[in-house]
């Protein structure tokens, strides 16, 4: 029974990581922009949610508003930062440095506005532990598992079968072809950034509801998302989701023998090894299609 509990805990952790990776992979797999400011942009919306919920506003309403803010910020970052750099013909290294600068700026401003102390917010009804047999789980845990699975399948289906998905794949594989087809690349890519950021916001919000919000929460979130995407394969939504679940299960399983801190270190080393052995990831094809 103890092993089953660890498996459930791993699925919950992996599902939250899956949401982080899903948003990051949507952006990176489509644009090849290594969006290191991913977690930092999400953190702006999360701090807004936290601050207004602590003022007495309904957490549900705060999260909905935060989701809208994350969506808008994602599109804004592409429009204001990445799109102009692309039009100027700047290389990926320059764009990466610009993203790193944005992340650094946000991490400096957040403590100045909200203070350096951790903030907490939660819904007691979601964090109440219930028992299914001898397995302890909360409604928030169930929501994380369901959200990751549903969003992964939905996004995969949209990209594979919808008109927007076909346009997105055309742009991803061949920019010139997309232009010939009359596709408005800037609008579509801006929407990708908006949707990817909103998905990442859902994951980080769920994670923060069971812990706390700090000015550096974005660093770990972005790092884990990036490593999962690289391990599963850029552009492979299925690969990212499976790797995220494996990460969560492995991290929780290792705590049977070592401390939580050492478990995290061991998992990082395992996935670094995976990336070194398979630089293209487990499930990436040689094409640039989003699948």
Image: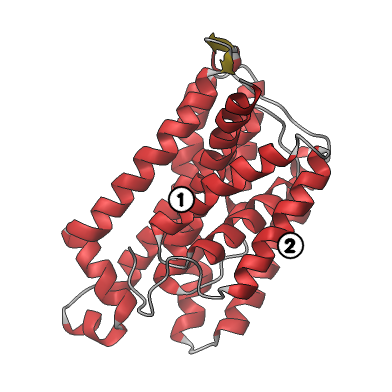
Circle nearer the N terminus (1, 2): 2
Residue at screen point 60% across, 30% down: 9
Residue under label 2? 104
| Residue 47 point in image, percent of width and height | 65, 38
The image quadrant that residue 59 belongs to is top right
- In the figure, is residue 194 to the left or right of 47? left
Q: Which mark is residue 138?
A: none
Residue at screen point 83% across, 35% down: 117
The answer to whether marks 1 and 2 mark residues whose Cβ atoms lie closer than 8 Å is no
Q: Sort mark 2 into few (<14), some (14-19) or many (20+) by Cα contacts within 10 Å.
A: some
| Residue 69 point in image, percent of width and height | 49, 44
Q: Is residue 73 visible?
A: no
Between 163 and 46, the residue placed more toward the observer is: 163
In this rendering, is residue 287 above or below 214?
below
| Residue 60 point in image, percent of width and height | 48, 23
In this rendering, is residue 173 above or below 155?
below
Residue under label 1? 241
- Badge 2 element: helix
In this rendering, is residue 66 above or below 279?
above
- In the figure, is residue 168 to the left or right of 99? left
| Residue 206 point in image, percent of width and height | 56, 33
State the quadrant of the N terminus.
Answer: top right
């Amino acid at each position: 029974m103890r092993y089953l509990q660890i498996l459930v805990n791993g699925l919950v952790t992996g599902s939250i990581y899956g949401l982080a990776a899903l948003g990051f992979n949507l952006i990176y797999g489509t644009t090849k922009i290594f969006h290191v400011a991913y977690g930092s942009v999400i953190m702006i919306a999360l701090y807004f949610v936290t601050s207004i919920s602590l003022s007495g506003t309904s957490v549900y309403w705060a999260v909905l508003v935060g989701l809208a803010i994350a969506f808008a910020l994602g599109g804004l970052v592409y429009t204001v930062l990445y799109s102009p750099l692309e039009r100027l013909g700047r290389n990926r290294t320059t764009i990466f440095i610009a993203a790193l600068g944005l992340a650094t700026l946000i991490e400096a401003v957040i403590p100045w506005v909200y203070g350096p102390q951790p903030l907490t917010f939660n819904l007691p009804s979601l964090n109440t532990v219930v028992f299914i047999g001898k397995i302890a789980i909360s409604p928030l845990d169930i929501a994380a598992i369901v959200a990751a699975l549903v969003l992964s399948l939905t996004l995969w289906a949209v990209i594979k079968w919808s008109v927007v998905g076909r346009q997105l794949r055309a742009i991803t594989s061949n920019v010139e072809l997309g232009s010939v087809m009359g596709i408005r690349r800037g609008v579509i890519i801006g929407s990708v950034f908006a949707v990817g950021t909103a998905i990442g916001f859902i994951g980080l919000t769920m994670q923060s509801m069971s812990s706390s919000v700090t000015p550096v929460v974005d660093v770990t979130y972005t790092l884990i998302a990036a490593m999962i995407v690289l391990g599963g394969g850029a552009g492979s939504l299925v690969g990212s989701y499976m790797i995220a679940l494996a990460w969560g299960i492995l991290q929780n399983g290792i705590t049977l023998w070592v401390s939580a801190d050492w478990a995290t270190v061991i998992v990082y080393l395992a996935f670094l090894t995976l990336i070194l052995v398979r630089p293209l990831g487990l499930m990436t094809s040689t094409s640039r299609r989003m699948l």
